[in-house]
Amino acid sequence: MNIFRNNSFIRNAGILFSGSIITSILGFVYWIGCSKIFIPEEIGKAGALLSLSGIIVTIADFGLCIGLIRYFNDFSNKIKLVNVVITLTLCNSLIISILCCLVAPLFSIKFNLFNEFTNIILFSCTTISQSLIYTLGSIFLAMRKTQYGFYQDLSSYIIKMILIFPLYFILGGYKAILISTFIGLLAAGILLGFKHLSKTINNYKFKPNIDYRYVSAFYKCSFSNQTSKIMQDAQMLLIPVIGNVILTEKESGIFYVIWIFSVAFRIIPNSFLNSLFAEASLSKSIFKSLLLKSIRNCFIILLLIEIIVYSTAKYILLIFGSEYSLFGEMPFILLTLANLFWTLNYSAIICCRIHLNNLDVILIGLILVISTLFSVILLGKEHGMIGIGYGYIIGNAVASAYSIYVITKTLSINEY
């Protein structure tokens, strides 16, 4: 207990890890409920829209949240810093989400639902609320107050779970899922996120501020890191969108639930490595030991999870329904296995972010997105969900070869 209390890396990693487990369990329960009351076709539509929304949140960030974590302690006026970052990310999200609604139908008839004006409003509101929660979570991580990020995430899931059933009877279909998500995220951000900011930053009060010049210090790391983050998130968030396009509506719904379940295990590397980024940004002298510990712990836990999934996948998926178990067993095993390679890639990206190694950040992200999307589209068209699973493993494995080189090179630097 003393180690947990006195070591901020262990404490924040522990909070991120345990908090993510709890929210993932709630998310698991949420999607179990959705699978019982919605047909797979409706889940597929909602999943594609939520994934598309997530891509917009990543793009709209423009590297602000990464820069915030990296340089938070360099700013004396933290109230202005926080308000500028929040305002810019929300404005960016609104503009890009509207543009997306206008362009998406040109690429697939499955996005013709944006021809309905209410869907544009609903999609934009959902995207803004996701952006708000993501930005507030980054602020709390920068201040090493990760428990507040956990509180708002927990609240958003609880609100979604409460709302989904009455919304199903009122609206039905994918709109009920989107509305429950929007209200849950927005309520958690406003009621808890801003409340905890006022506790953490003296005299804090939100006031919109679009003074982008105030965060100009972020630019030296924001372009490369944001480019990498877009590519890193794109290969994750575009997979359900691609699945929605190349699979049947029923298969896309089954695949989305399996996808959400498998990527939830990334809370393990995310917790350790995001905490590592926050800690090492303050002191590079502790970087090597923390990195090695993070990778070791992640692999031990992920290997145990893969063994369990391999042995019990079809029984686990029965919780969602017989169709999920029948068609999703092998894709679930493959997607879970890919998390091992993804951990190496994310570890290398964290190394580069800490040392401002812009070229390698971009190269890793570029290799990751090209190899993954190419493999997924090629194999997915021929072999359906199983093909997407194999393609996702291949893409991450190809990128991890270069990531291992980057990690080895970084650890060999004399300062360590």
Image: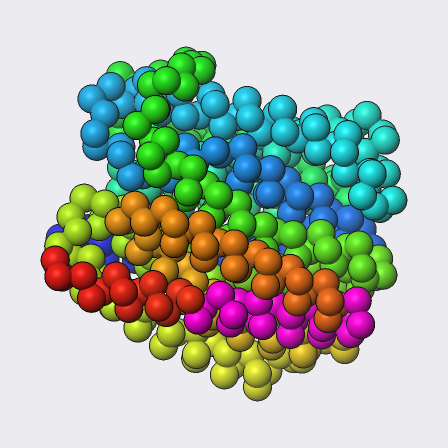
| Image-quadrant location for residue 69 | top left
Which span is picked out in magenta? 381-401
Position above or below: 211 against 363: above
| Image-quadrant location for residue 75 | top left
Image coordinates of residue 32 in percent, x first then y, are 66, 60
* Residue nearer the viewer, 223 or 202: 223
Q: Is residue 63 visible?
A: yes
**Across the whole image, how many numbered discs are drawn on residues?**
0
Describe residue 176's horizontal placement relative to residue 270 as left or right. Answer: right
Image quarter hosting the C terminus: bottom left
Residue 398 among magenta residues: yes
Describe residue 195's horizontal placement relative to residue 33 as left or right. Answer: left
Residue drawn 74% across the image and 41% down it = 176
Residue 384 among magenta residues: yes
Provide the major secondary structure of the magenta segment.
Answer: helix
* Residue nearer the viewer, 68 or 177: 68
Image coordinates of residue 289 in percent, x first then y, are 18, 65
Q: Is residue 37 visible?
A: no
Image quarter hosting the N terminus: bottom left
